[in-house]
Image (tube, coloured by chain):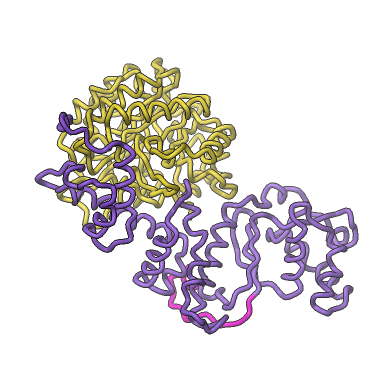
Chain colours: A purple, B yellow
Amino acid sequence: MADNVNDPGPDLAALQRWMLEVVTSESWTLDDALSGAARFGIDCDAAVVGTQRLSARERLSIYVDSYRMRLIECLRAEFPVLRRFVGDQVFDLFAGAYLGAKPPSSYTLFDLGAGFADFLDAARPQPNDGRGTLEALPANLARLERAFAEAERAPGVEATQQSPFPTPFNLVLLPALRVRLPQSLRLLQLDFDFSNLLAQVAADQPFGTPAAGDMLVAVARSHYRVRLHRLERWSFSFLSLLRDEGDEGGSVRELIPGVAGELGQAQDEIGARLFAWLPFALDAGLLAVA
Amino acid sequence: MITGGVSDEAASASAFRLGLPNLGDGVGLRHVHFPHLMATAPSEWGVDWFEIISENFLDHHGYAAHVLERIAAHRPVVMHGVSLSIGSIAPLDRVYLRKLRELAERIRPAWISDHLCWTGINGRNTHDLLPMLLTEQSLAHVGDRVRAVQDYLGRELILENPSSYLTFHASQMSEAEFLARLADATGCGLLLDVNNVYVSATNHGFDPVAYIERLPAEHIVQIHLAGPSDCGTHLIDTHDQPVPSPVWRLYALAQARTAGGVATLLEWDANIPPFAALLDELGKAKAARSGAMPEAGEVRPVAVGALSTPIDFQLSR
């Protein structure tokens, strides 16, 4: 071990700074990565033990290659539908560029994909053609898949689903009875209808390009299953207004005027729709009793 | 044989390491086995205990947390982390430590372990177990951090020897000596991964038997078993295949050094087999402890692209 009797070599801090720079480098070759880390004054062959089987550089390459592969694998696992849709080569280009722009900083790999959709959105050629074009699809799909991942882990409604739900009558008419959005709910306004694509990829079937169109959806968890729910304007509006009420929630009755006003519809009509919809919404994890 | 959740062998073991029990034979809790474990009565699980990857359950309030709740109600659980970064020059991540402590308060693990490594600095986490420079300076640095973590968690930290693919000229001692002195200085426990010893010994050309004999047996509280992959020029710690013969021999040696035995954990983190097959592999540990070497092959070769520290088990989907 002690082959450095006369030369103490680099200290712990210097070595870690150098190695991190090389391992996480965006360079295409190890030589370039080492050049990029030259400011640390550490020579690879002088720092890393090489043998006949593997040189110092080859040993360092194991960590360099693993870093990128591991994180791309992680993104592939979190965005399986996007990966299938664009193919491995394009997906890995997206992922590699994202990792370069936003290297992991969290203790959990779950956080790695948090900014992927925003990155894809920002990476669209500018000026872009707006919503609903093919260029907008990857970011839209990434946003939806991230919503699934978040809904899977967030606090949900399972504990409260054990007890009987209030009747729709009470929910609509009693101001004291408040409802709230579960933390496991994600409301999204998408430019494509991804429902067929999700089903086809899950069933490993051939798929086409999703139809463009304004899609209001919720990703919700119920009984530990995460599902995509297509919403109508009034239910999306209701859930959006409820979201503004925070964890305290709000009474259905008090929210109805806001929904009716936003959509230009009669309050009675919205109330009737809610009356029929609320039992389903509670069971599906779209809302919870506050 | 399983009786009331703990094997006879484990229940009769009298030796304790740092006051910690021999939990018997366990497996890593992986999401592919959730349906089986939830559909099967705990008396039929066939394992004495489970090890979780701590990070998988931090901030998790979904099905995985629900499964863990059931598991922890019926079996001892150990929290095994990959993000403590005990060897890093960066300050300890207080948020991570707080969440680790909160999870421990919730599931009451038998102990909490992580690796002798660093995972990043400057706000970056490589999510890899990067190799340590093994110097007096490093030893003092890691010792201070182990003490700080132990004070914060209110319990001994258990540290695992990682697989490594490079060493540094500037290192002044072997990894075994580093761990032995660290354990002596801090009172921390050791998680002896005999697969990692085999991988590193092969990659760096040291004697794995001497490595194990250098470790203080009284500090070893757990042993990891796993199968690596042969890349031709080196071994990679892939956890994706059965435990090979050389690793079983090291396992038998390690158990023989720890009078009364220590807890055994089989890791299988990629190409994970059905639970029954996992139990078959775990069952070989008992034979190995009794002196009968289990039937096992050599390390299997792998094509390019083998990934150390596989990520399948770190993701819940």
Q: Is residue A23 left or right of residue B304?
A: right
The residue shown at (86%, 70%) is: A257
Where, by quadrant of the figure, is residue A166 drawn?
bottom right
Percent x, y of residue A264: 83, 79
- Asked if residue A47 lies in the magenta stretch, the reply is no
Where, by quadrant of the figure, is residue B29 drawn?
top left
Percent x, y of residue B40: 51, 43
The residue shown at (46%, 79%) is: A125
Which residue is nearer to you in this view: B48 or A193? A193
Q: Residue furthest top?
A: B14
Which residue is nearer to you in this view: A182 or A159? A182
The residue shown at (64%, 70%) is: A217
**Above or below, A47 relative to A58:** above
Stretch in magenta: A199-215
Q: Is residue B223 left or right of residue B62?
A: left
Percent x, y of residue B115: 37, 36
**Above or below, A177 relative to B67:** below
Which residue is nearer to you in this view: A279 or A234? A234
**Above or below, A14 relative to A103:** above
Q: Image quadrant for the N terminus of chain A?
A: top left
The residue shown at (51%, 82%) is: A127
Q: Is residue B296 left or right of residue A53?
A: right
